[in-house]
Amino acid sequence: MPVYTVKTLAGLEDVCAKEIVELGYPNVEVRTRAVQVEAPERFLYEANYRLYTAISILETILAGTLRQPRDLYNQLAAIPWDKYMDQQQTFAFKGHVSSSYFNNSIYAMQLAKDALVDFFRNKFGRRPSVDRDHADHHFVLRVNEEKFELSRDASGAPLFQRGYRQQTGRAPLNEVLAAGIIRNMDWDPSRPLVDPMCGSGTFIIEAARMARRMPAQMHRKQFALFHWPEFQSGLWEEVVNQADAAIIESPDIRLLGADQDGRVVDIARTNAKAAGVEEITQWKQAAFQQLPLPWEEPVLIMNPPYDVRLQHRAIEQFYGEIGTVLKHKFAPCEAWIFSANPEAMKAIGLRPSRKINLYNGQLPAQLRQFVIFAGKRKDQYD
């Protein structure tokens, strides 16, 4: 049975594995920033179309051991490359190399490219071309000391590119990260969800799409696997139709995104319309401190600014206001705060119930849960 690697973001490995199991594929193994899956070919199609927490889906071509740098070329040159592409198509290599055999990744990638090119030139008298930006086939090479693995990328562009985002506001949140945070929260769609600092609306839109059981990539038109010689258009159509048939048209949910910047609220509303969730989401221009909550005991999710350009005292004061508003205006509630500023998080002044380590891009970040009770309880204050 084929082995696939589902790439995800650091900290989302467990929720990604759970999502894969929920699709009906239980043979999973959690790795660093990845989940390895043993599954039939249908998984490749379902994973690309339906998974919310995947960055890309890889199929392993070859794994091996090196004794010297040239071994990489020799083993890759023995691959029947015409099984995976033809000489009229374009290709690109990417990946990561951490090995004493190679001073840098460039040499390893060059050996891989030469192995592919020489195979076609020797067998057919002509070679395919490299296209780093819009390749038909994306091959992924990873070398860790003497071990290497070659895969092909079935996704192409990263799967956080959902195809619905029309515009962005300030520092837009990666869609996969937003979906992974929602899943980490174990949010129950029967409870109202509010993002009082919504920016371009990613948290609320991803939550709405999940509540409707929409396939993550239903608005996306292109996947790298469409260029694979063995691509089965009939199987793809079957997977798409089956997933689309499970969409809930009008779920009974309450979702609100708000921001003090009216421009980004308009952007969020536009993105929600493009994502097919305009009718089940609400948007409001209001500062966090003045936001009226339309429902009792909501779940709040927020990604407050932690811009390094802001003065240290100003950002800590702002986070302190967050804690004050949560205690005195929104209680009782459950609040989740995602931030890459640990010092500012301390200024909130509340004791977190949970802490989940994540990344926002290259920045270490943390998702913290705060359960806010009505009245005074000593155990909720830091």
Image (tube, grey):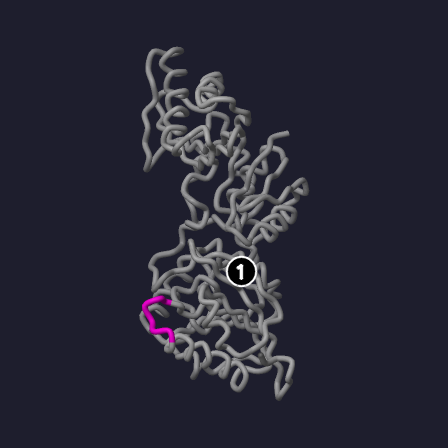
Residue that carries the numbered disc 1 in the rendered image: 181
Quadrant into which the N terminus falls: top right
State the residue at coordinates (54%, 48%): 51
Q: Is residue 12 above or below residue 200?
A: above
Q: Can you give x and y, in whole percent of width and height, for residue 185 in the image?
A: 59, 63
State the residue at coordinates (41%, 35%): 94
Looking at the image, which is closer to me, 106 or 152?
A: 106
Q: Residues within 10 Å of mark 1 (few under 14, many from 20)?
A: many
Q: Is residue 29 above or below residue 380?
A: above
Looking at the image, which is closer to me, 230 or 247?
A: 230
Q: Can you give x and y, in whole percent of width and height, for residue 111 in the image?
A: 39, 24
Residue 43 quadrant: top right
Q: Identity of the amino acid at label 1?
A: Ile
Looking at the image, which is closer to me, 10 or 170?
A: 10
Q: Is residue 310 magenta?
A: yes
Q: Is residue 296 above or below residue 7?
A: below
Q: Residue furthest right?
A: 26
State the residue at coordinates (68%, 43%): 26
Quadrant into which the C terminus falls: bottom right
Q: Secondary structure at mark 1?
A: helix
Q: Is residue 266 magenta?
A: no
Q: Can you give x and y, in whole percent of width and height, for residue 126 in the image?
A: 33, 15
Q: How many marks?
A: 1
The range drawn in magenta is 307-312
Q: Is residue 367 above or below residue 103?
A: below
